[in-house]
Amino acid sequence: MPSSQRQRPKILWIDGVGSYAMCDANEVSIGQAFPGNQVDLAIRADISRKACIIRRKGEDHLIQPFQTTSLDGQLLERPAILKSGCTLQIGDRVQLRYTRPTLLSGTARLELVSNHRWQPVLNSVILLGDSCVIGPQSDAHIVCLPPRGTDWNGRFIWFRQSDSWICKGVECPGLVVGQQPVSAPFKLETGLRIQSDVASWTLTEP
C-alpha cells in the first residue's frame, strides 16, 4: 500500500501514565518529523526523510536502514534482526532501544534514549505481535502502575482476532467500556473510553 494511503499507528492514552503509538502493521517506517512527511513514526531530529523500516518477521523484527545506522555499535550494511536490549543509532545522534519484555510474545517496545522526541510526543512505540499486555508487572509491554495505595496485580490483555483487536481485563475491578460495565472480552474501537478502578485509557486516531 502506498505510504500516502497507509493508516498511521493509533495512539493509546493512559491516564497518569502516558501515550504510546500502537503499531500493528507488518512494516513501520521511521523518519524525520516535518509537515507532509508520510512516515509512520516521526522523530524531531536531523535524520533522513525515511531513515529506516522495521518489519515483523514471524516472532522477530528486522530493521532495513536507508541511511547510516548502527546496531550495538556495528555499522549495518544489510537488514538485521533486532534482539531484545539492543541499541540502534540512526545518523550521528539518534539512539533507540528495542526491548521484548517477554519472549512469549512477539510484541516489542521501541524507546528513544537520546535527547530527541517523537512527533507527536510519545512515551514509547509498541510494535505489536499477536498480543499485548498492559499492567504493573515488569514484563508487561506497557508498565502501568496502579493508583497510590492500590494493590493491583491484574492486567489488560490485547490479542488479535482476524483484523480486529480484542481486550480482556484480568482482575480489573470496576471495568466499564464506554458506559457499560463488562466482564467478558470486548472489541477495541478508537474513541472508546475504558475505565476501571486501577487504570483508564482511550485508543485514538493519530
Image (tube, rainbow, N blue to C red):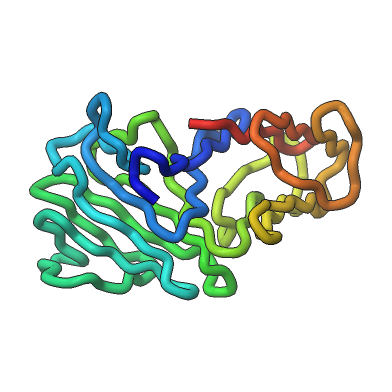
Q: Is residue 102 above or below residue 44?
A: below
From the viewer's perspective, is 86 left or right of 5?
left
The location of residue 147, given as percent across then percent down, is 70, 34
Could you tell me which residue is drawn at 84 percent across and 34 percent down?
A: 176
Q: Along the line of sight, which residue is nearer the eye, 138 or 3?
A: 3
The location of residue 156, given as percent across then percent down, is 72, 50
The location of residue 23, given as percent across then percent down, is 48, 49
Q: Quadrant of residue 202?
A: top right
The location of residue 22, given as percent across then percent down, is 51, 46
Could you tell me which residue is drawn at 42 percent across and 43 percent down?
A: 6
From the viewer's perspective, is 131 left or right of 25?
right
Could you tell me which residue is drawn at 37 percent across and 63 percent down?
A: 55
Could you tell me which residue is drawn at 31 percent across and 50 percent down?
A: 29
Q: Along the line of sight, which residue is nearer the eye, 28 or 99?
A: 28
What is the total number of numbered labels drawn onto the structure image? 0
